[in-house]
Image (cartoon, coloured by chain):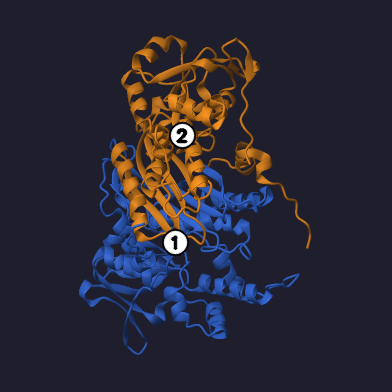
Chain colours: A blue, B orange
Amino acid sequence: MEEKKRTEIARLGEFGLIEKLTGNFYLNNNSTKTGVGDDAAVLDTAADGADRYTLLSTDMLLEGVDFDLVYFPLKHLGYKAVVVGINDILAMNGQPKQLTVSLGVSSKISVEQLEELYEGIHAACADYGVDLVGGDTRASVNGLVISVTVAGSIARDAVVFRSGARPNDLVCITGDLGSAYMGLHLLEREKRALDGHPDPQPDFKGYEYLLRRQLKPAARLDIVETLAENGLVPTSMIDLSDGLASDLLQICKSSDCGARIYLDRIPIARETYDLCEKMNIDPVVAALNGGDDHELLFTVPLEKQDLISKVGGIDVIGHITAANTGAMLVTPDGGEIPITAPAIG
Amino acid sequence: MEEKKRTEIARLGEFGLIEKLTGNFYLNNNSTKTGVGDDAAVLDTAADGADRYTLLSTDMLLEGVDFDLVYFPLKHLGYKAVVVGINDILAMNGQPKQLTVSLGVSSKISVEQLEELYEGIHAACADYGVDLVGGDTRASVNGLVISVTVAGSIARDAVVFRSGARPNDLVCITGDLGSAYMGLHLLEREKRALDGHPDPQPDFKGYEYLLRRQLKPAARLDIVETLAENGLVPTSMIDLSDGLASDLLQICKSSDCGARIYLDRIPIARETYDLCEKMNIDPVVAALNGGDDHELLFTVPLEKQDLISKVGGIDVIGHITAANTGAMLVTPDGGEIPITAPAIG
């Protein structure tokens, strides 16, 4: 047999891969406003001058990669899968409305376990006012696979892309960073420590917050609603799922700009600091590269500073600069460190 | 540890399972017209009196269950994944417009192989005028997983559900049945025969049609368009993916009706008969239960009989009856056999 050329996927990285695979696709339909390249696609499905667009986004969660059923309760997994899906719609400034859930289910999963998973899906649907409208349940010869697609709705003039950040805009984030990542570390540590114990009793005392951030993250619908109530439309926005560094670089790339982020303004929870110290992990690395935060990263014009502080629950961590200055982390002593995304693979 | 109750998923069957898992979900949003229970959900996403609805449907294909990479070329797999997704929109009488593709990709897959997969996705998108608008590509520790979600568009008064069949309606199908199933048998046979050969040269001569039906099925956009051109709105419709028996029973259940199907009217291709004879398989079983046909099964009022025969490419195989008569297969000698769906598991 002829030897075929073989390039490992890890060599390209996620975004290089998407570009390589979808770069030659073109859009056929007038109803497709924007496609691949943001948190969600923007569709003009009514196509007759209606004042709202439809948003569409999809995510996949795979056992052994995105979750470990040894310590991830199925109810929480169902909840988290919905949150992960919803956040993509929120990152466009939209309202999540409907979702579909497809499952690949191995024979080791029982009906009772699937019911637990759906309890979590149900709870998240109720919390965020989203309707489960479809799905596909298939046998899997391997692990559990969850695919979530969310449809949302947004006023035409309120869509926020990754590409709208402009120099001097403020860089804002919700919540705190690195806590979900440290929750994962804690779960992994207990799994290793208790492996083989007949009756494992993990000790998570004092770190309940970190666990909750990993196992039951919240979608920031509250923030999107609060921004709307205050008439505040961000200039750009993204869901913080890959870590601040990687997601900020996405905004910089899409908006053709740089950024200055002040290290001492990055919100890091006390429990995160505590556990980082015990586990000998740099809390800044956890915050920048940990990922799984499911908070929102967005930019607003400088003149909205007062409004942002009035709104509450939002931290301004830096500002947007011209493209040629790059994305920099400014340390308390005034030093500058280039922000880079960790390699994938 | 307390012993938990464990029910195997196979015991409930697909539809029992969906009912059990989603029966307690309710719909929160006015924009959700219908949810779980048909080929696609119907959404009023514009929500302001626009004259079109949005359709949304999702499918998952798993390696080792839905396809075998030993003999399924990746390019064809990409094409087929799109066709499978599109057919759900067509089964609602809608026009497919956008799709998202999420992939779980194991490290054994190279970039070049993914490019082949996307070549097929691209070809299907071009053939059916559908836009790829998003996706999610994840590492998988197991096999290849493909999740496809398709959004479609339809005029409000043209939506066709599974539930609209009425007694005396004609039962119509497109294409022929059982050929994709026999194509699969052929591929499996050659795989077994050639297992371990250093340079396998499978012999498919004379059965190219069966292979094409399995490896590169067509979405019946042509039929939906032709029906529309002739002003023909089916009373009910479903995508033939699980086999005529199972899918007809879905229509009967949703429409609360029975059916009489005439065995000698079921279209079966010559190649299907040939291979069935060689492999000692009953062609009627292949046609009724084989599945993977990806044709359309629909009903029209009796008075449309002339129009249906004029349109072409459609076979009338029976008619709808009252619920209490059940779904029956009528043999050439006038005998009646109850139609049952094969057990899942």
**Quadrant placement of the N terminus of chain B:** bottom right
The residue under label 1 is B108
Query: As displayed, is residue A262 above or below residue B152?
Result: below
Q: Which mark is residue B243?
A: none
Which of the 4 image quadrants contains residue A255?
A: bottom left
Marks 2/1: CA–CA distance: 28 Å
Left or right: A174 with respect to B3? Answer: left
Residue at the (53%, 27%) spot, across then down? B277
Tell me residue B317's x, y (percent): 49, 17
- Residue nearest the observer in this picture, B134 or A93: B134
Query: As displayed, is residue A128 above or below residue A309?
Result: above
Query: As displayed, is residue B184 above or below residue A61?
Result: above
Residue at the (25%, 52%) spot, across then down? A24
Describe the element under mark 2 as helix, strand or loop: helix
Q: Amino acid at mark 2?
A: Ala
The residue under label 2 is B180
Is residue B326 visible to us here? no
Tell me residue A295's x, y (percent): 45, 65
Which of the 4 image quadrants contains residue A72?
A: bottom right
Q: Residue furthest bottom?
A: A333
Counting every numbered tag in the picture gives: 2
Is residue A104 visible to us here? yes
Chain of the residue that carries numbered disc 1 in the rendered image: B
Left or right: B193 with respect to A260? Answer: right
Tell me residue A252's x, y (percent): 28, 68
Tell me residue B230's x, y (percent): 33, 18
Task: Using the rendered image, report if marks 2 and 1 lie on a common chain.
Answer: yes
- Residue nearest the observer in this picture, A253 or A8: A8
